[in-house]
Amino acid sequence: VGYRLAELAALVGGRVAGDPGRVVTAIRPLEAAEPCDLSFLNHPRYRDRALTSRAGALLVDEAAAALVAAAGARDLLVVADTPLAVARLLGLFHPAPRREPGVHPTAVIEAGCEVSPAAFVGPYAVLGAGSRVAADAQVHAHVTIGRDCVIAAGAVVHPHAVLYDGTELGERSVVHAGAVLGADGFGYASSGGVHHKVPQTGRVVIGEDVEIGANSTVDRATLGETSIGAGTKIDNLVQVGHNVQVGRHCILCGQAGIAGSTRLGDYVVLAGQAGVGGHLELASGAQVAAKSAALSSVPAKVQVAGIPAVEMRRWRRQTALIAKLEEMVRRLRAVEKKVGAPQAQEE
Amino acid sequence: VGYRLAELAALVGGRVAGDPGRVVTAIRPLEAAEPCDLSFLNHPRYRDRALTSRAGALLVDEAAAALVAAAGARDLLVVADTPLAVARLLGLFHPAPRREPGVHPTAVIEAGCEVSPAAFVGPYAVLGAGSRVAADAQVHAHVTIGRDCVIAAGAVVHPHAVLYDGTELGERSVVHAGAVLGADGFGYASSGGVHHKVPQTGRVVIGEDVEIGANSTVDRATLGETSIGAGTKIDNLVQVGHNVQVGRHCILCGQAGIAGSTRLGDYVVLAGQAGVGGHLELASGAQVAAKSAALSSVPAKVQVAGIPAVEMRRWRRQTALIAKLEEMVRRLRAVEKKVGAPQAQEE
Amino acid sequence: VGYRLAELAALVGGRVAGDPGRVVTAIRPLEAAEPCDLSFLNHPRYRDRALTSRAGALLVDEAAAALVAAAGARDLLVVADTPLAVARLLGLFHPAPRREPGVHPTAVIEAGCEVSPAAFVGPYAVLGAGSRVAADAQVHAHVTIGRDCVIAAGAVVHPHAVLYDGTELGERSVVHAGAVLGADGFGYASSGGVHHKVPQTGRVVIGEDVEIGANSTVDRATLGETSIGAGTKIDNLVQVGHNVQVGRHCILCGQAGIAGSTRLGDYVVLAGQAGVGGHLELASGAQVAAKSAALSSVPAKVQVAGIPAVEMRRWRRQTALIAKLEEMVRRLRAVEKKVGAPQAQEE
């Protein structure tokens, strides 16, 4: 299948500069694109690649259009927001594979579990009593869903994900392979040299349009709920502790971790391998830099970095000063010499 | 079901201050509790919440009892150790769901694998020859157990956990979903530009009353055993390398990692995202702070922090001094001016 | 079975010092070895253990041979490279268990999936249409392989690993339990307060002789391929982001992570819990120390450490200077006193 640039422009709310009738059959990166392809320029640093690309047409924003137009003729699809347009057009050219509704004969569905006839349940899936799988949901091979769970309409659970009893997954949310929702929180009462398990009796509630990456884990609450707000996106190998409340539209990057009972507002960002201590509050818009550890609460819209994390600008200054420590020692020694102070044994 | 406070007091070794006949039907957090519920005050900072809670009764220790008693009548269940009592009572009100003994017809049990008639084996579990599942053990859906494994009495293996050949799981130990015990250790002999695999021929032995979190991994030994001592608790996404020896009653928090051949004594604590280098010794009671990296051995009962980790108090001082670097530079400049030293180009 | 030292020497290209006819029946560590065993001395620090070991024979290199020979008679197998010889002999004494070819009757193989009669497919494996499993490959219990995947000759996929659609696994490569290859990359176009999913339409291609640890994740590319070069070894719980290119013979240790679109040359080493930012280049032979974060590109053969990572030697100096900050403050104060500068409020 191919699309005329004019059609694509209508779809993404852009305009064509050049031949609106040009047909493109795929989206490809600049280096791989052929004359039948649409490619895109999403950063000025790639301008040279764009100019030498064999792509038949380029998706650009107004600024990038000027960059490449200066260098000669090229059919352009000009949009306000390149990444957004790329996202939409990739979806057009590569529609997500969806399985036909129906329950595979090898699926084990306990009595009292309700599966919509418009849902897909794959081979060897196991669904517990009291659970409900809504229309257009997809429960893939080997998924294990406990008792009293909800898989809302349009949700997708990839192979081997595990939902413990009582977990709720919102509409259109996606859980990737190997993710575990609702395992016991890490809670013990230590007494007499023994760590006595605190029964984890709560559950996990995931909002709408959430995505949870492969092999990530979200623990059930001790009492009440661990919750992930609508629109939040969680990468792979992320740990969310018991009783954590994650707001809406947060971004938790790969291998980030949140200790128990911490609350995140909306639009909070944890960069890769970031950690957040327990019983804290990260207000809306707070951001924790990669590899940093937020060990105290963070006000709204504040970026923090370091271990323990401090305000980003302060962290940058400290890092710069640490890089100058050698020079400081030299200067101190010079002053000591000048004033005849006893010099320390340094080496 | 409900319980009179007097009954609960007998169970947890406490006393009732108020009406011993008051019946409570659930334990709920302060904010959610109703007059039919028991709630608890486990930190003085929550005193105000306790006073405004609608809970019919409160579980408190002697100090907390004084705090809330001062503010008026309330039925109290007074104990020596609040968290321990909460743990016990949660177990009373929320008994852990245990499956009825029996082997699901879809389980694949190789010839020569011995399953107690008092054990539960769930749908699609696969158990290898020479393995043994003892009484009251629960092997949930999709668990894969290799050959010559032991699942001791009362042990629980949650869905999708994998035990490679030869793994031993002690009595009452719990393995959460997706955990992998006994995969090959990461060992190669590099020669001529090629990393030759060192066959990992040992195994994993887990003691009694151990809990292992979701998607955690414990590698088999190159030779001999990787071992986890009785009573040790391991959170989610933790990595334990080959030939590591973890002592008894240790606590390994989420995303912590231990490189190969390191030994931990008893009661060692690794906080969240902590790392420990290979071939080290962390003596009993040693603690590694969150996000820290122990790159050398740690003596008994010593707390370390930082990268590389140093004694906690030293790390605190260093962190405080780093925060004052800017001020130090100013002071240095002032002294330089005073003595007429040549000032460095700073910015 | 037992082997004469002369046979073993021929196999590993070594020589016997002592009785070439001595028969050994196992390889054991120094402490556990009996007179019928071969043990090995791979570091001078273990010389005393070697001398008191009950092992019948010792595998040593020339330097170690001198160390132990000085202390009296012992049959020695002397080689140029002890770890390499240990690797080969462990493989001799402990041949890796390989399942007999054949497809378990419970495996679900979609129409259009081609499985070699010389391959093993275990219980409850699920293989999608268009996929191909070559001779001598082993697909273990519960493995889920999507559509259009390739499992090349001799490759091993351990229980519960998941390969999403289109994933290619090279000859003799090994994927451990719970690893997930080809899940969606973490890509969103944020607009109007919503994170719109960027469809991840590429795939994952794993070269030959690669090993991927338990519960590690390698994301599919947005467009094109995420690729892992031949001979690269990846430990447990490692995250490889979308569009990452990992070269040949790299070593990625436990819990390391690489953000999207970064390229690693050949022989790159990421130590445990190391992180690498997105869109970077780590040239061949670059090394990132444990717990460090490479947030900018690293030239060939350069070792970096710290957060953000700097050249290793610089990081060591900085770390040493941070340890001396307390002393520097004292010296600064002394100078201030001497010159009568106003002293800051320090405590």
Image (cartoon, coloured by chain):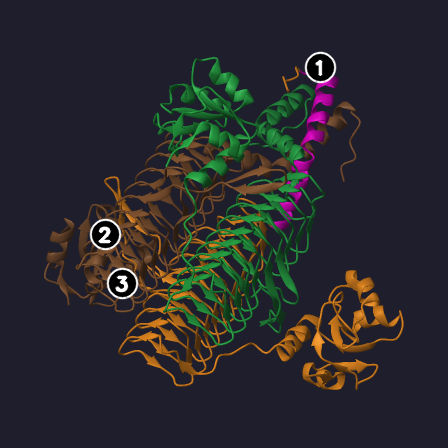
Chain colours: A green, B orange, C brown
Marks 1 and 3: in contact by CB < 8 Å?
no
Residue C128: give x, y in percent of width and height: 31, 55
* Element carrying mark 3: loop
* Image quarter in which the N terminus of chain A is found: top left
Say left or right for C70 vs B312.
left
The Cα–Cα distance between marks 3 and 1, rounded to whole angstroms, is 70 Å
The chain ID associated with circle 3 is: C
Q: Which of the pair B341/B89 is nearer the observer?
A: B89
Residue where numbered disc 2 is placed: C60
Residue where numbered disc 3 is placed: C28
Marks 1 and 2: in contact by CB < 8 Å?
no
Closer to the observer: label 3 or label 1?
3
Checking the image for residue B340, the label placed there is: 1
The Cα–Cα distance between marks 2 and 1, rounded to whole angstroms, is 64 Å
Three-letter residue code for mark 3: Arg
Three-letter residue code for mark 1: Gly
Mark 2 Cα-neighbour bin, 10 Å: few <14, some 14–19, many ≥20: many
Secondary structure mostly taken by the magenta-highlighted segment of the chain: helix
Residue A308: give x, y in percent of width and height: 63, 44
Relative to B319, say whether B164 is above or below: below
Three-letter residue code for mark 2: Val
The chain ID associated with circle 1 is: B
Checking the image for residue A4, the label placed there is: none
* Element carrying mark 1: loop
The chain ID associated with circle 2 is: C
At x 79% / y 85%, what residue is drawn? B20
At x 52% / y 57%, what residue is drawn? A217
Relative to A172, say whether B204 is above or below: below
Magenta residues, as a range?
Answer: B312-341
Inspect this view and state whether residue B48 appears: yes
